Image: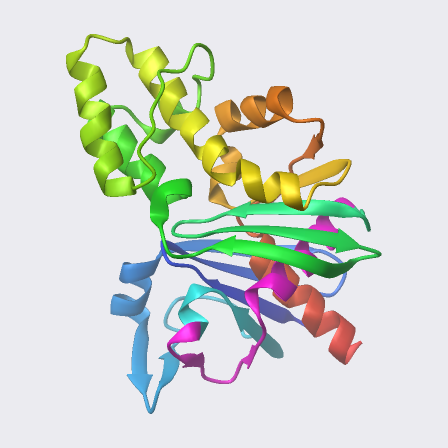
Amino acid sequence: MLVCGVDLGSRTVKIAFSDGERLVEKYYFDTSEFYREYGQKKDAVLMIDFARMGLPRADITVATGYGRNTLGLAGAEIIPELKAHVLGAVYQTGLQDFTLLDLGGQDSKVIKVRKGRMIDFQTNDKCAASTGRYLENMAHVLSITLAELSRYSEEPVELNSTCAIFGESELIGKIIEGHSIARLAAGVNYTIFKRIRAMLQSLQSDTLVFTGGVAHNQALQRIIGRETKFTLVIPREPQLNGAIGCCVHAWQKNG
Protein backbone atom coordinates (compact mmCIF):
# COMPACT_ATOMS: atom_id res chain seq x y z
CA MET A 1 0.00 0.00 0.00
CA LEU A 2 1.41 3.36 -1.05
CA VAL A 3 0.30 6.35 1.04
CA CYS A 4 0.77 10.01 0.27
CA GLY A 5 1.09 12.80 2.85
CA VAL A 6 0.59 16.39 1.73
CA ASP A 7 1.49 19.46 3.77
CA LEU A 8 -0.04 22.53 2.11
CA GLY A 9 2.35 25.10 3.59
CA SER A 10 2.12 28.86 3.22
CA ARG A 11 5.48 29.04 1.42
CA THR A 12 6.18 25.45 0.36
CA VAL A 13 4.01 22.44 -0.42
CA LYS A 14 5.62 19.25 0.87
CA ILE A 15 4.62 15.81 -0.42
CA ALA A 16 5.82 12.49 1.01
CA PHE A 17 5.17 8.95 -0.25
CA SER A 18 5.59 5.89 1.96
CA ASP A 19 5.09 2.16 1.52
CA GLY A 20 4.25 1.75 5.22
CA GLU A 21 7.80 0.96 6.31
CA ARG A 22 9.91 3.76 4.87
CA LEU A 23 9.84 7.07 3.07
CA VAL A 24 9.84 6.24 -0.64
CA GLU A 25 9.87 9.66 -2.31
CA LYS A 26 9.66 13.32 -1.31
CA TYR A 27 8.83 16.49 -3.22
CA TYR A 28 8.91 20.22 -2.51
CA PHE A 29 7.03 22.89 -4.46
CA ASP A 30 6.79 26.64 -4.13
CA THR A 31 3.21 27.14 -2.93
CA SER A 32 2.10 29.80 -5.43
CA GLU A 33 3.68 27.88 -8.31
CA PHE A 34 2.07 24.64 -7.10
CA TYR A 35 -1.43 26.14 -7.12
CA ARG A 36 -0.87 27.99 -10.38
CA GLU A 37 0.58 25.07 -12.32
CA TYR A 38 -1.20 22.05 -10.88
CA GLY A 39 -4.26 23.16 -8.93
CA GLN A 40 -7.82 23.99 -9.81
CA LYS A 41 -10.44 25.06 -7.28
CA LYS A 42 -13.88 23.55 -7.71
CA ASP A 43 -16.66 23.91 -5.12
CA ALA A 44 -14.14 24.87 -2.38
CA VAL A 45 -12.11 21.75 -3.14
CA LEU A 46 -8.59 21.76 -4.58
CA MET A 47 -8.27 19.45 -7.56
CA ILE A 48 -4.66 18.35 -8.14
CA ASP A 49 -3.56 16.39 -11.20
CA PHE A 50 -0.86 14.24 -9.62
CA ALA A 51 -0.35 12.28 -12.84
CA ARG A 52 0.47 15.49 -14.70
CA MET A 53 3.00 16.28 -12.00
CA GLY A 54 4.71 12.96 -12.65
CA LEU A 55 4.05 11.73 -9.10
CA PRO A 56 3.18 8.14 -8.12
CA ARG A 57 -0.43 7.13 -7.70
CA ALA A 58 -1.17 6.61 -4.00
CA ASP A 59 -3.75 4.27 -2.50
CA ILE A 60 -4.48 6.73 0.33
CA THR A 61 -3.85 10.47 0.56
CA VAL A 62 -3.89 12.49 3.79
CA ALA A 63 -3.37 16.27 3.83
CA THR A 64 -2.75 19.01 6.35
CA GLY A 65 -1.22 22.47 6.50
CA TYR A 66 -1.94 26.15 6.03
CA GLY A 67 -3.93 25.56 2.84
CA ARG A 68 -6.44 23.24 4.46
CA ASN A 69 -8.03 26.25 6.18
CA THR A 70 -9.37 27.63 2.92
CA LEU A 71 -10.00 24.54 0.83
CA GLY A 72 -9.97 20.77 0.95
CA LEU A 73 -7.92 18.47 -1.25
CA ALA A 74 -9.98 16.23 -3.51
CA GLY A 75 -9.74 12.57 -2.56
CA ALA A 76 -7.77 13.27 0.62
CA GLU A 77 -8.55 12.98 4.31
CA ILE A 78 -7.79 16.28 6.05
CA ILE A 79 -6.21 16.27 9.52
CA PRO A 80 -5.20 19.15 11.85
CA GLU A 81 -1.68 20.55 11.53
CA LEU A 82 -0.82 19.99 15.19
CA LYS A 83 -1.75 16.32 14.99
CA ALA A 84 0.28 15.82 11.81
CA HIS A 85 3.38 17.45 13.27
CA VAL A 86 3.21 15.46 16.51
CA LEU A 87 2.80 12.19 14.60
CA GLY A 88 5.70 13.08 12.33
CA ALA A 89 7.99 14.05 15.21
CA VAL A 90 7.25 10.90 17.22
CA TYR A 91 7.88 8.74 14.15
CA GLN A 92 11.08 10.51 13.09
CA THR A 93 12.71 10.67 16.53
CA GLY A 94 11.27 7.65 18.34
CA LEU A 95 10.64 9.92 21.33
CA GLN A 96 7.44 9.96 23.40
CA ASP A 97 8.04 12.89 25.77
CA PHE A 98 9.32 16.20 24.40
CA THR A 99 8.46 19.74 23.39
CA LEU A 100 8.02 20.27 19.66
CA LEU A 101 9.03 23.57 18.05
CA ASP A 102 7.85 24.00 14.47
CA LEU A 103 8.86 27.18 12.64
CA GLY A 104 7.30 27.40 9.20
CA GLY A 105 6.94 29.98 6.48
CA GLN A 106 4.34 32.14 8.21
CA ASP A 107 3.61 30.72 11.66
CA SER A 108 5.28 29.18 14.68
CA LYS A 109 4.05 26.35 16.89
CA VAL A 110 5.21 24.98 20.24
CA ILE A 111 3.61 21.70 21.38
CA LYS A 112 4.10 19.78 24.60
CA VAL A 113 4.04 16.02 23.98
CA ARG A 114 3.68 13.30 26.60
CA LYS A 115 3.43 9.57 25.85
CA GLY A 116 3.31 10.42 22.17
CA ARG A 117 0.28 12.71 22.50
CA MET A 118 -0.20 16.47 22.53
CA ILE A 119 -1.18 17.75 25.96
CA ASP A 120 -0.75 21.51 25.42
CA PHE A 121 0.27 23.95 22.70
CA GLN A 122 0.77 27.59 21.77
CA THR A 123 0.87 29.10 18.29
CA ASN A 124 1.74 32.43 16.75
CA ASP A 125 -0.08 32.64 13.42
CA LYS A 126 -0.92 36.36 13.43
CA CYS A 127 2.56 37.72 12.72
CA ALA A 128 5.40 36.56 10.45
CA ALA A 129 8.08 37.93 12.79
CA SER A 130 9.26 34.52 14.02
CA THR A 131 9.04 32.60 10.75
CA GLY A 132 10.87 31.68 7.59
CA ARG A 133 9.27 34.59 5.74
CA TYR A 134 10.88 37.00 8.21
CA LEU A 135 14.30 35.40 7.66
CA GLU A 136 13.84 35.61 3.89
CA ASN A 137 13.01 39.31 4.10
CA MET A 138 15.92 40.09 6.41
CA ALA A 139 18.39 38.17 4.26
CA HIS A 140 17.20 40.23 1.30
CA VAL A 141 17.78 43.47 3.24
CA LEU A 142 21.32 42.28 4.05
CA SER A 143 21.87 41.11 0.44
CA ILE A 144 22.90 37.62 1.57
CA THR A 145 21.47 34.14 1.13
CA LEU A 146 19.53 32.25 3.78
CA ALA A 147 22.45 29.82 3.97
CA GLU A 148 24.85 32.65 4.77
CA LEU A 149 22.41 34.18 7.27
CA SER A 150 22.31 30.88 9.16
CA ARG A 151 26.08 30.95 9.81
CA TYR A 152 26.04 33.80 12.31
CA SER A 153 25.09 33.59 15.97
CA GLU A 154 27.83 35.45 17.89
CA GLU A 155 27.71 39.06 19.20
CA PRO A 156 24.23 39.79 17.82
CA VAL A 157 23.19 43.40 17.22
CA GLU A 158 20.16 44.18 19.36
CA LEU A 159 16.94 44.34 17.34
CA ASN A 160 13.76 45.17 19.25
CA SER A 161 10.96 45.53 16.73
CA THR A 162 8.25 42.90 17.20
CA CYS A 163 6.86 43.46 13.70
CA ALA A 164 8.32 41.89 10.56
CA ILE A 165 7.69 45.04 8.51
CA PHE A 166 9.09 47.52 11.05
CA GLY A 167 11.93 45.09 11.67
CA GLU A 168 13.22 45.74 8.17
CA SER A 169 13.39 49.48 8.85
CA GLU A 170 15.19 48.85 12.14
CA LEU A 171 17.70 46.59 10.41
CA ILE A 172 18.38 49.22 7.74
CA GLY A 173 19.07 51.70 10.54
CA LYS A 174 21.62 49.29 12.05
CA ILE A 175 23.28 48.92 8.65
CA ILE A 176 23.63 52.70 8.44
CA GLU A 177 25.27 52.67 11.89
CA GLY A 178 28.05 50.56 10.36
CA HIS A 179 27.61 47.18 12.08
CA SER A 180 29.16 44.16 10.36
CA ILE A 181 27.11 41.67 8.35
CA ALA A 182 28.08 38.96 10.84
CA ARG A 183 26.66 40.85 13.83
CA LEU A 184 23.58 42.01 11.91
CA ALA A 185 22.80 38.46 10.76
CA ALA A 186 23.35 37.17 14.30
CA GLY A 187 20.93 39.83 15.52
CA VAL A 188 18.28 38.65 13.07
CA ASN A 189 18.70 35.03 14.20
CA TYR A 190 18.65 35.98 17.87
CA THR A 191 15.44 37.94 17.31
CA ILE A 192 13.73 34.73 16.20
CA PHE A 193 14.71 33.12 19.50
CA LYS A 194 13.45 36.09 21.55
CA ARG A 195 10.04 35.82 19.90
CA ILE A 196 9.60 32.13 20.70
CA ARG A 197 11.31 32.10 24.10
CA ALA A 198 8.16 32.67 26.15
CA MET A 199 6.34 29.81 24.42
CA LEU A 200 9.30 27.50 24.97
CA GLN A 201 9.51 28.40 28.66
CA SER A 202 5.81 27.80 29.28
CA LEU A 203 5.83 24.39 27.58
CA GLN A 204 9.35 23.23 28.36
CA SER A 205 10.64 19.67 28.56
CA ASP A 206 14.08 18.11 28.81
CA THR A 207 14.10 17.58 25.04
CA LEU A 208 13.20 19.99 22.24
CA VAL A 209 12.44 18.58 18.79
CA PHE A 210 12.93 21.32 16.17
CA THR A 211 11.06 21.02 12.84
CA GLY A 212 9.99 23.17 9.92
CA GLY A 213 12.10 24.82 7.26
CA VAL A 214 13.67 27.17 9.82
CA ALA A 215 15.14 24.13 11.62
CA HIS A 216 17.84 24.16 8.92
CA ASN A 217 19.11 27.47 10.38
CA GLN A 218 22.28 26.35 12.18
CA ALA A 219 22.74 29.69 13.94
CA LEU A 220 19.31 29.40 15.55
CA GLN A 221 20.16 25.84 16.58
CA ARG A 222 23.27 27.12 18.35
CA ILE A 223 21.38 30.00 19.99
CA ILE A 224 18.69 27.66 21.36
CA GLY A 225 21.42 25.31 22.59
CA ARG A 226 23.26 27.96 24.58
CA GLU A 227 20.23 29.93 25.81
CA THR A 228 18.15 27.00 27.10
CA LYS A 229 18.60 23.73 28.98
CA PHE A 230 16.93 21.69 26.25
CA THR A 231 18.56 18.72 24.59
CA LEU A 232 18.01 19.76 20.97
CA VAL A 233 16.95 17.13 18.42
CA ILE A 234 16.66 17.86 14.68
CA PRO A 235 14.86 15.08 12.77
CA ARG A 236 16.33 13.85 9.51
CA GLU A 237 13.55 15.55 7.52
CA PRO A 238 12.53 18.61 9.57
CA GLN A 239 10.73 20.44 6.75
CA LEU A 240 8.87 17.30 5.66
CA ASN A 241 7.64 16.51 9.19
CA GLY A 242 3.97 17.44 8.64
CA ALA A 243 3.72 15.41 5.42
CA ILE A 244 5.37 12.45 7.16
CA GLY A 245 2.85 12.79 9.98
CA CYS A 246 0.06 12.52 7.41
CA CYS A 247 1.59 9.25 6.20
CA VAL A 248 1.79 7.97 9.78
CA HIS A 249 -1.91 8.77 10.28
CA ALA A 250 -2.75 6.78 7.14
CA TRP A 251 -0.73 3.76 8.38
CA GLN A 252 -2.33 3.84 11.83
CA LYS A 253 -5.84 4.16 10.45
CA ASN A 254 -5.58 1.64 7.63
CA GLY A 255 -3.02 -0.75 9.05
Residue 175 higher or lower than 85, as above or below: above
Question: Whole-percent x and y of residue 72?
Answer: 44, 81
Q: Which residue is at the far bottom?
A: 43
**Residue at the spot 34% in from the left edge and 28% down from the top edge:** 160
Q: Would residue 176 be found to the left or right of residue 36 on screen?
A: left
87 in magenta: yes
Residue 69 higher or lower than 217, as above or below: below
Query: Image quadrant of residue 116?
Result: bottom right
Question: Whole-percent x and y of residue 225?
Answer: 63, 24
Question: Whole-percent x and y of residue 47?
Answer: 38, 81
Q: Is residue 108 visible?
A: yes
Q: Quadrant location of the C terminus?
A: bottom right
**Residue at the spot 70% in from the left edge and 45% down from the top edge:** 99
Query: Image quadrant of residue 234?
Result: top right
27 in magenta: no
Q: Which residue is at the far right?
A: 115
**Residue at the spot 55% in from the left edge and 23% down from the top edge:** 223
**Residue at the spot 53% in from the left edge and 80% down from the top edge:** 76
Q: Would residue 60 be found to the left or right of residue 204 on screen?
A: left
> Between 210 and 253, which is closer to the camera in this rendering?
210
Q: Is residue 58 visible?
A: no
Residue 69 higher or lower than 155, as above or below: below
Q: Which residues are magenta?
A: 69-93
Q: Would residue 168 be found to the left or right of residue 244 on screen?
A: left
Number of residue marks: 0
The colour style of the image is: rainbow
Question: Whole-percent x and y of residue 19?
Answer: 70, 65
Query: Image quadrant of residue 67?
Result: bottom left
Q: Quadrant location of the N terminus?
A: bottom right
Residue 209 higher or lower than 227, as above or below: below
